[in-house]
Image: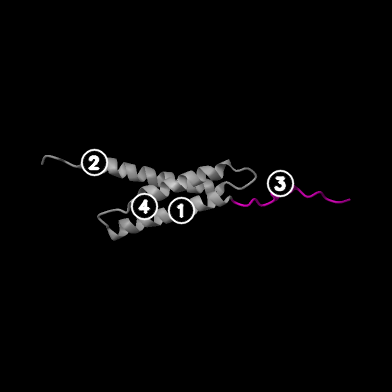
Amino acid sequence: MELEMNNKNKRKLPTISGFLSFLIALIALAGVNIALLIDIDDFPELFLVQLPIVGFFLGLLGLITSKRSRLYALWGIGISLFLLIFTFLMIGISWVGINPKP
């Protein structure tokens, strides 16, 4: 008698767009952290807005694919959304926190 192998344990390869989304989100996160640590007055717009938006849409593209692992796509979307929300919250909080009259 032979034991039947379960085919559900096969490894799934990640999607290219999902992996690119994760990689772009990590690069944008590192850029924001470096800009905050160095205390740069003008934040680079590339790391705050453009890269997270590209990473978000690549992650969405990676989610639509079937029969592939979506782990990197989910991580890329999560980090990109965090960066976008962080950017707009910091702009909103600093805008409200400015006291125009002493």
Dots 3, 1 in contact, CB < 8 A: no
Q: Nearer the viewer, mark 1 or mark 4?
A: 4
Instruction: Looking at this view, name the residue that lies furthest to the bottom.
Output: 38
Residue drawn 53% across and 52% down? 19
Residue drawn 42% across and 45% down? 53
Write down the region rendered in magenta: 1-14
Say whether disc 4 or disc 3 marks the residue closer to the N-terminus: 3
Q: CA distance from mark 1 to mark 4?
A: 11 Å
Residue matched to label 1: 24
Q: Nearer the viewer, mark 3 or mark 1?
A: 1
Dots 1, 4 in contact, CB < 8 A: no
Q: In screen coordinates, is 44 left or right of 72?
A: left
Q: CA distance from mark 3 to mark 2?
A: 52 Å
Image coordinates of residue 76 in percent, x first then y, are 48, 48
Residue matched to label 2: 95
Front residue (pair 91, 65): 65
Residue matched to label 3: 8
Q: CA distance from mark 3 to mark 1?
A: 31 Å
Q: CA distance from mark 4 to mark 3?
A: 41 Å
Q: Is residue 28 above or below residue 93?
A: below
| SS type, badge 4 | helix
Q: Amino acid at mark 1?
A: Ile
Magenta portion: prevailing SS class: loop
| SS type, badge 1 | helix
| SS type, badge 3 | helix
